[in-house]
Image (spheres, rainbow, N blue to C red):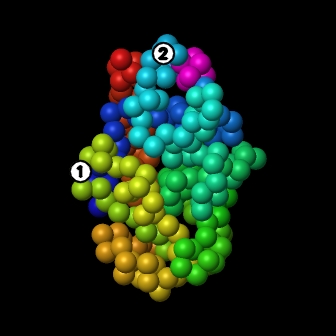
Amino acid sequence: MGQILAERICGTNEAFCFQLLRLLGQGQPVSAAQMGAALGISDIAVTETFQRMPDIERDEIGQVVGWGLSLQPTPHQFRINGHTLYTWCALDALTYPILLEQTAQVESICPITQTSIQLRVGPEGVSALDPATAMVSLSIPDTGPDACNRASFCNQGHFFASPEAAASWQADHPQARALPVEAVYQLGRIIAARRQHLSTQQSPAAHTQ
């Protein structure tokens, strides 16, 4: 399951996306100039890539404020390096600390019980999970990364306070799966490893022309 999921959500532009996540993790909007300087490509090439990225969040002057990791509030609060950020889904909250090699304090709200779920997530694992019965939902895209968008994939990824709460939600979302937090964290390890591998194999410039 982990390899299939990784193959279907990891694309051909991971080097670019990895750098964007790093910069968003600093808690400020990301400009084309920042990305260009970090990757050694032109601002125009960066802007063109931004325009092709599905669901990307940009402010009034064109800076990126969200792509998986966001400055805009979502149900999944993600505190890292003194910055309060948000992720688009529960899987992101469990994967980004591995990918960024930093520890995050995560807080989310169960959409069924409205219970707060809190945990610490880092490269070494998950700790301080409260409640300990928490579950995570996710769906596996039917095809590749082009079909993996925020509406069909990210919006199906929630934290739940208990298996019962997850089952209640699943009754209306039969295409999704619900797993324990630790199991989804391990899937996140597989995804992070694939993204890290692809980011070293792909040239950012090759995908911005």
Q: Is residue 167 left or right of residue 111?
A: left
- Tell me if I can see residue 30 in this picture: no
Q: From the viewer's perspective, is residue 60 above or below residue 122?
A: above
| Residue 133 on the magenta span | no
**Mark 1: few/some/many CA within 10 Å (<14, 14-19, 20+):** few
Q: Nearer the viewer, residue 152 or 17?
A: 152
First in residue order: circle 1 vs circle 2: 2
Residue at (65% x, 73% y) in the render: 116
> Which residue is at the far right?
82
Identify the residue under disc 2: 44
> Which residue is at the far bottom?
164
Q: Nearer the viewer, residue 188 or 51?
A: 51
Identify the residue under disc 1: 143
Residue 91 screen position, x and y as percent: 47, 58
Say what secondary structure mark 2 lies in: helix
Q: From the viewer's perspective, is residue 205 above or below residue 170?
A: above
- Amino acid type at circle 1 is Thr
The magenta-colored residue range is: 32-38
